[in-house]
Amino acid sequence: MAAPSSSSASSNVMLALYEKKTTQIDLYRPLRNFIAFNYSEREAQNLDDDLQTLKQLRSDVERHSDPSLPARRDLLQSYFKTLCLVETRFPISPDKDHINSITFVWHDAFKNKQKALQQNIHLEKAAVLFNLGAVYSQIGLSYDRSTVEGRRQASHAFIAAAGAFAFLRDNAATKASIGSSTTVDLSVECAGMLERLMLAQAQECVFENSIAKGSTPGVCAKISRQVGLYYEEALAALNAAPLNQHFDKGWVSHVQLKAALFFAEACYRYSLELHEKEEIAEEIARLKSGITALSEAKKSSKGAPAQLLEAITKLEATINRNLERAVKENDRVYLMRVPSPTSLPPLQSFSMVKPMAMNEVLDASKEKMFASLVPDSSAKALSRYTEMVDDIIRTQAEKLQQASELTRVRLKEMDLPESVLALEGNFSLPTDLKEDVEAVQVCGGPAGLEAELQQLKDLRRVNQEMLLQVEELLQKEAREDGQFRSQFGTRWTRPQSSTLTKNLQDRLNRFAANLKQATDSDARIERSVREHSALMSILDRRPIESALPTLARPIMSLDANEDAIVGALKQSLRQLETLASERAGLEDMLKEMKRKDDILPKLMTSTGSYEDLFRKEISKYDHICEEIAQNIEAQEQLLLQIQAQNEDFSAIFNLEDYKASREKCYKQIQAAIAKFREIKDNINEGLKFYVTLQDAITNVKQQCSDFVMTRNMQCREMIEDVQRQMAGLSFQDNKTAGAYNNSYPPAGHQPPRSSSQPPTEPRPQAPPYYQPPEQPAVAGYAHPAPPYSSPPYGAPQQPPPQPPYHLAPPSGAPYPPQVQQQPPASHEYGQPAYPGWRGPYYNSHAQQSGSMPRPPYTVPSPYHPPPYQSGYYKQQ
C-alpha cells in the first residue's frame, strides 16, 4: 500500500499509493455494434480508428506496458478524457436499449480481494482518477528530497495527486457509489482523506525547503503547523466510518505520528521566536505542549517506520533541552508566571499548497474522438436545458438568502433570543468585552497586582542597598586617605579623594534623588490600587457573567401566566430554527438534483421534440420550489407571532429596566478594565525603571571598585617612598618623592618613571581606573554593547544637559516624564525615574556581564527609552 521514500537523506518517510487493478474487457465490439445499429455501418467504419484508439488505451491501462511514471500519468489522463467522450455518446447500462454487454471490474487498492462490478462508465472513470492520483503520489516519492529542487518537484507532484483525489471526490465518487457493487477506496470519504494526506506531504516538502533556506522561526512554525493540520484532518477521516475498518494500523500510526511530529515542530519553531523576544513564559508553555503531543503519539506508534520514530525522538530531545534552558533562565532572571498550555491561543498556520485544479488537465472539450457521432443540435439543446436549470437554482437561492437575512434582522430588533437566555441565566458578555476580561484574568487579574507591588518594593530595596554599598566604599577610601594625610602631613602629596570622586558622588546623589522620586511614585500606585480595588474586584468574578444583572420574574403576578408566555415564545423560536434548517436542506437538494441531472443520453436517443423533453425534465424541480415558497410563507407568519409574544414578554418582565441595568454593568466592567490596565502599565514602568537604574548603579559600583583598588596600590607605593624619605635615603629617592607631587593626575594616567631612576623592587602594575567588562558570548542571546563608558575620574567634563527627571514630579503623574535623547558626551549616570517599559515584568535583554556579581532583577537595556505613551505620566 505504501511505497518507501527513495531519498535516503529524507528525515521522514512519506506515503504513496499503488494503483487499483482491473480485469480485461473488450470495448471495441460493443461500441461498434451500437454505432452500426443506431447510426449506420458507414458511420461505424468512419469511427473505426477512434474505436481502435480506445481499445489500445484500455489495453495499456490493463497491462502497465510502460514502466515510466510520467508515461503512465499521461496514459491515464488521455484515457480519462476519452471516457468523458464515451460517456456523452454511448449509454452503457443494464438497460436493454443501451450497451449492456460491458461490465467493468475493479479491485480495491487497499484490500485487493474486494472488487466492484458495474455496467456503467462511472466506476471506470472513478477508478482511472484514483490511479492517476496514485501515480502522482509515486512520482512525488521518486524525487530526491535531499535537495531543494527535489523537494520542490516532489511538492508539485503531491499537489497534483491531491488535485486528482479532490476531482474524484467532487465529480466521480458519488456516481460510482450509486451502483450495487462498490469499494471503499472510491468513496467520497476515502477520496477526501487521500486529498488531505497528499496536501500534508506537499506542505511538508515546503517546510523542509523553508528550513533549508533559513526562513525565520515564525514562518517555519506557521508552515509546520499547517502540515500538522492536514495530517490531523486525514487522521480524523481514517478514524471515522467507513475508513476506520479498512486501513492497516501502519497507515493510521504513520498519519498520527506525523500529526504529532509537526505540531511539536511548530511549537519548537515558535518557541525560538518567543525566545528571541524574551517571552520566556509562553516559550516554556509551548515547549511543554510539544513534548506532551509527542509522548501521547508514541503510545500508539505500533507499525510506524523506524525512520519516523527516530525523527520524533530527535525532536523530543531538542525540545527537552530548550525547555530545561528556558526554565532555568525564568527561575534565575525573569521570574515570569508560566501559563497553562490549555490557555494558550492556537498556533497560527499558513498553507503554502492547494490541490491542483484538474478541470483543465482533464478537459475533454477539445478532443476530436467521436466528434461526428453527436449532432450539434443535441449539444445546443443540452446547453439550453442547463441554462434553464441554473436560472431556477439562482432564483430560489436568492429567495432563501433573503428569508434568512430577514429573520436575523427582525430577531435582533426584538433582542431575541438574548433576553430569553438571560431569564434562564445563560446570557454572556459581548464578544469584545468578554475577550478583554479574559485577557485581564489570564495575566493575574486585580488580585495579582499585590504581588507585582511587592516586586516593586523588592527592586527598590535592592537599588537602595547597592547605592549604600557604593557610598560606603567611597567613604571608606576617603577616611583612609585622610588618616594617612594626618599622619604624614606635607609629605603626603597625593590628591585628596574628594577631588577625584566628585563626578561619582554627583552621580550617586542623582541616583538617590531618582530613587526618592520613584518611592513617591510607588506610593501613589499603591494608593491607586487601594482606592480602586472595589471597582476592579468585578474582574475577579469567574465566570464574569455572574456579575451581570439577571432578568428576574415579577414579585407579584396577577394571573400567574409568566411561564405560559415564556414557554410559547421559546416554542416559536424553536420553530423558527427548524424553518431555517429546512431552508438549508432545500438549497442543498437543489444543488444535488442539478449535479445528478444528466439528460444527455435521453437527448441523444430522443426522437421527439426537445421542448417536450425539457418540460418533462424541468418539472423535477417544481416540488422543491413549492417547498421553498411554503417555508418562506410559514416564516413570515411565525415572525408576526413572535413579535406579539415578545411584546407580552417585555411587559411582564420589565425588559427595558433590565437592559438599562445590563448596559450599566457593561460600563462598570469597561471602567474596571481601563483602571486595571492603567495601574498595570504604571507598575510595568516602575519595574523597568528599577532594573534599568540597577544596571547603572552596578556600572558605577564597578568604577568605584576599580578606583579604590588603584588608590590602594598608589597608597602602598607612596608609603614606601615617604618611609624612605624619613629614613634619609638617597637624593634620587627624594626626586622620586618629589615626582609624586605631580604623579597622581585626576584623569588616572600612570606617569612613566625617569630613565635615570635606579631600579627598585618590582611593584605590581596598577590597572587603569576603569575598564568596561568584556561581553561574553552566550548561545541563544545577543548581548548589547555596554551602554556607557566613563572618562577617567579626574578628567574635566562638561556638565550634561539637565534632564527633566531632576525636576519635581508634576501633580497627577506617578513618575516624572522624560524626553528621548542620546546619552551626553560625558556619559554621566543621571538616571530618570521610570524609563519607558515595553513588555512584561522582567522580559528584557540579557544581562550585561561584569566582574562584580549581578544582584537579582538585573536586566540592562538602552539608557535612552522612548517617551511615555500613557496619559498617566503626561504632565498636566
Image (cartoon, rainbow, N blue to C red):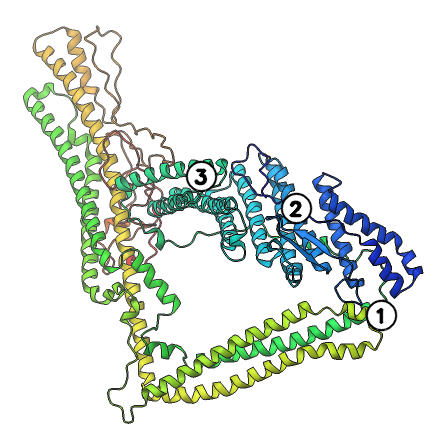
Q: Is residue 876 left or right of residue 139?
A: left
In the displayed image of the protein, which residue is found farthest to the right?
Answer: 42
In the rendered image, residue 410, in percent from the top left (x then y), is placed at 47, 82
**Residue 269 in which image quadrant:** top left
In the rendered image, residue 533, in percent from the top left (x then y), is placed at 21, 64
Q: Are marks 3 and 1 in contact (CB under 8 Å)?
A: no
Question: What residue is rendered at 63% in x and 53% in y?
Answer: 165
Question: What residue is rendered at 63% in x and 73% in y?
Answer: 590
* Amino acid at dot 1: Ser
Label 2 CA crowd tier, 10 Å (few <14, some 14–19, many 20+)? many
Question: What residue is rendered at 33% in x and 34% in y?
Answer: 786
**Res. 19 mark:** 2
* Residue 822 visible in the snapshot: yes
* Amino acid at dot 2: Glu
Distance between the Cα atoms at labels 3 and 2? Answer: 30 Å
Question: Mark 1 — residue?
Answer: 377
**Res. 312 mark:** 3
As helix, strand or loop, the secondary structure at mark 2 comes to loop
Sequence-first disc among 3 and 2: 2
Distance between the Cα atoms at labels 2 and 1? Answer: 40 Å
Residue in front for this viewpoint, 119 or 736: 119
Distance between the Cα atoms at labels 3 and 1? Answer: 63 Å
